[in-house]
Image (cartoon, grey):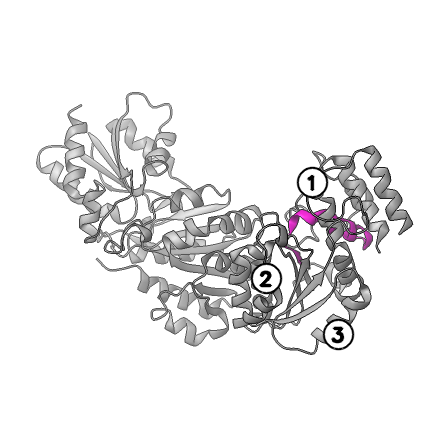
Amino acid sequence: MNSDLRLRILNMICASGEGHVPSSFSIVDIINYLYEEIIDVKSLSNDSIDRDYFILSKGHGAAALYAVLEKFGFLTSSEIESYGKGHSILGGHPDATRIKYVEASTGSLGHGLPIATGIAMGLKIKGINRKVFCLVGDGECQEGTVWEAANIASNQGLENLIVFVDWNSSAQQLMPIENLGEKWRAFGWKVFTCDGHSNTELRQILLEESEVCGPSVILAKTVKGKGSKLIEGHGVWHHKIPNAQELEQIILELQDA
Amino acid sequence: MPSLRPIFAKTLFNLGAVDENLVVIVGDISHGLLGDFRNSFPSRYFNIGICEPAMVGVAAGMSKIGLNPVIHTIAPFLIERAYEQIKLDFGYQKISGNFVSVGSAFDYSKLGCSHHSYADVSLISHLPESQVFLPGSPLEFEILFQSAYKQNKVNYFRLTENSHDVEIESKSIKIGKGIKLREGSTLTLITTGAALRNCMLAASELEDIGHSVEVLYLPTLKPFDSGIIRESLRKTRRFISVEELSSHDGLYNLILKASAGLDGIKSQQLAISEFIRGYGSYAEIQARAGLAQHQVSRAGIDLVGK
């Protein structure tokens, strides 16, 4: 449980009065794990295209990405504390033209995976052996472009592309998607499933993934709002800012975790 | 009236041989013509299938890591269907690329409105770093594409199947430059792309009955050559825009902006104001839109009489 990162997310969003706390809590463990153990973090510091790529397609979880980027030294604490303010480079959805270490300006769902697919294809054209990671939501998997890109990626045999689905069942309360894994498999992807809040399971799955060819999707089972029972699940908390009392309660829950 | 597609394919082949960052992505069209490129540079040619929005996103990803994508399919599918991808993945992210469409406004005249595109030029023009070209002859495409494709812009080239067949000197073809093709004193016909043909014919016809008509041709609509417009209108004080574009946001609007502050200008717009329903030859659809030679001439007579 990355309580420190969750507290950072919470402070950012509450101070500015804008952001998506439950979505950020849902994905923060996956992003942190990638930066901690998988992505070649040193390669991000140079200006070369010879680096690993992480694209947050569900841009409304931006605060989780910002918190992780701060942890790994790619954003300063004053940048984080400026989140949402007029002079800040950080806001509710990431702007890649302003933040050097964000790879895509997302926010409208269904854009990240086609871009990630293009980067993966481009790396192969240039003969660069790097990985592209893309995080999409399970609700986002209702977008047509997700499946257009899924089709292209398997057709092109992109073994350098790994998608994480933040499988927090958002889709279930919209238009339920049955057999999400079957759908990806039908599009030619290798499908893995794990607990998206467990480093142990993420580590095991990425080890297994490295043995296969072709694009892989990891259906990471997550809980929206993970870390605070008050905001867990779906409904009003999706885009709600906690008041002072609620904030105190969430902080206590995170500190006890 | 030759199509511009063969010169498009030839230009890409020539540039692809010397520029290893040039990547061609097509949406199930022009494969035959692009065969030389595909066979010579197979790792940089993709027929990505029928999925225009993802095709645009994929191209943005390639551009992000230094490749220079040329994205090609039928105008309404490339620009109007995939506009949010163009707007966000290219425009908002400040990523460059080259969009080359076929079909123009209604070149697929026998296929109906699903294959027409009236708003493509307007949509691309909204992006801050865009350039918009409507070449009406193979030579114009060749020169303008070679000049623009590496400029780190969002370039849009609207190819036509119907060249205007008007001879234009290569030295007058430059990005952002209009071309004066006839000198006159009482009326200026202003046009772009394939519509030049009818303007030149109408100008001759009007001259035969005693009117002195100037013809300005603008194969680049963005950046727009305001200077050539102002110079002409100071003299003639009358213009007709003839455009295979939406009447809501096209050449006429650009001319009005360019002529701001000039007094006593009389004008008329000949453009597309509604879905051009039905089927027929290019000339028939053109007439249904009010863009035929006789309609340009008629508008000229009416305006000069005012």
Per the model, the C-alpha gap separating discs 3 and 2 is 27 Å
Residue A236, which numbered label? 1
Task: Say which amino acid is labelled 3.
Answer: Leu
- In the image, A10: left or right of B283? right
Residue at 28% in and 21% down: B264
- In the image, A153: left or right of B206? right
Task: Please tell me which residue lies in front, A253 or B163.
Answer: A253
Provide the secondary structure element on which disc 1 rests: helix
Indicate which disc, 3 or 1, sits on the residue closer to the N terminus.
3
**Residue A171 point in image, percent of width and height:** 62, 54
Residue at 19% in and 35% down: B213
Please provide the residue range marked out in magenta.
A55-73
Residue located beneath label 2 in the image:
A178
Residue located beneath label 3 in the image:
A207
**Residue B12 point in image, percent of width and height:** 41, 65
Of badges 3 and 1, nearer the viewer stands: 1
- Residue furthest out toward the left: B209
Per the model, the C-alpha gap separating discs 3 and 1 is 38 Å
Q: Is disc 2 on the same chain as disc 3?
A: yes
Residue B153 showing in the rendered view: no
Task: Please tell me which residue lies in front, B52 or A95.
Answer: B52
Residue B261 sits in quarter: top left
Task: Say which amino acid is labelled 2.
Answer: Glu
Residue B157 showing in the rendered view: yes
- In the image, A201: left or right of B185? right
Q: Residues within 10 Å of mark 2 (few under 14, many from 20)?
A: few
Residue at 87% in and 46% down: A253
